[in-house]
Amino acid sequence: MNERSFRTLDLNLLRVFDEVMAERNLTRAAHNLSMTQPAVSNALRRLRDALGDDLVRRAGYGVEPTPTALTLWPTVRDALHQLRASLAPGEFDPRAASNAFVLAMADATAAKIVPGLVDILEDEAPGVSLRVLPLTTRDPRELLESGTADLAIGHFPGVLAELGALHLQEGTPRFVHQRLYDGEYVVVMRRGHPLASGPLTLDAYCAARHLLVSFSGRPFGFVDEALAGLSRKRRVVLTVNQFFTAGRVVANTDLLTVLPRHFVGATGMEHELALRELPLPVPPVHVDSLWHRQAEHQSAHRWLRQAVEVASARGFDLASALAERPATQ
């Protein structure tokens, strides 16, 4: 696009483009914009003509973006976000708000944080609602970029390493994070398991059959990385993508698994399970909240982040109470 074409460009077309990119569906985009689908299609045609690119192509029940559209969208979305924040910067009033926030996290994280969040909503923001999406990746940036989730909470070592490297290069990362807590993981098995009494040695641990909680389905996790550093390995015979499922399976089989210590008490199965310390050193598992930089100064999003931080601290209080129950080791 040359300078003359840009001066005559209808900037309303960019709002349509942003909504179509977020929804990947013309009908839903039209509904969100209070437009008809033909009007959305016409707006896309005009933007295509101006940019000289198809932007989106039909795919299944929706559309998929072209490489040009994928390159252009972050800039357009950031510009629209900044303009919206400048024109309507009103402070978020939790007692009068009716926002619906979307959080992405694993079930073990939700068990720790969500009860406290519900308490905060009841006390401070009775009109606000939450939706929790299952976290199925260690890199949730696409969820945040597309607006599918407002906040992702979990263990994101690769993402944080990239953000740290970009910061050292004096760049401005597109994502921001905050440390919430450090997770402590333990070996979990059924109470009558042959390894449930006596010390758990590294040899016995490696010789056992294992269940791994893996968001990606890949049968290799942080414990396997630690074992590889010792030139050891274990046999993972089953992978699942939920911690609760892992607890239920090991309660009824001879498989071992590794779960967050705080989560065992939240399963309701703690009297069926035995806990043992991991027989090898593993790096700390940091749990962070992650969000898109464009939401950094939004008052509603700032309130959400603070609520999550408070709920995380309350989760530790709950975990301490559960830890005072009769030991299952």
Image (tube, helix red, strand yellow):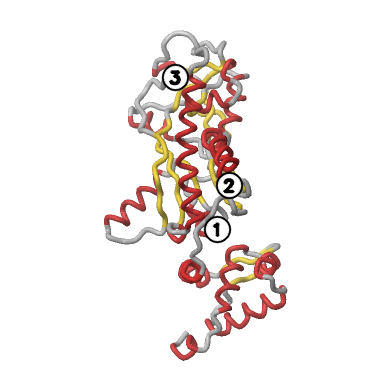
What residue is pinned by disc 3?
Answer: 205
Q: Amino acid at mark 2?
A: Ala
Query: Disc 2 versus disc 1: distance between alpha carbons?
Result: 22 Å
Residue 272, image x, y percentages: 59, 16
Q: Is residue 23 left or right of residue 84?
A: right
* Of the image marks 3 and 1, the number of the one nearer the N terminus: 1
Residue 257 is situated, as x and y percent measured from the top left of the image, at: 51, 25
264 versus 116 height, above or below: above
Compare marks 2 and 1 and give the one earlier in the sequence.
2
Residue named by callout 2:
125
Mark 1 secondary-structure assignment: loop
Q: CA distance from mark 2 to mark 3?
A: 47 Å
Q: Quadrant of residue 288?
A: top left
Residue placed under numbered mark 1 in the picture: 147
Q: Which mark is residue 248?
A: none
Amino acid, disc 3? Tyr
Q: Observer-nearest residue: 112 or 194?
A: 112
Question: Label 1 is placed on what type of residue?
Answer: Gly
In terms of secondary structure, where does tag 2 sit?
Answer: loop
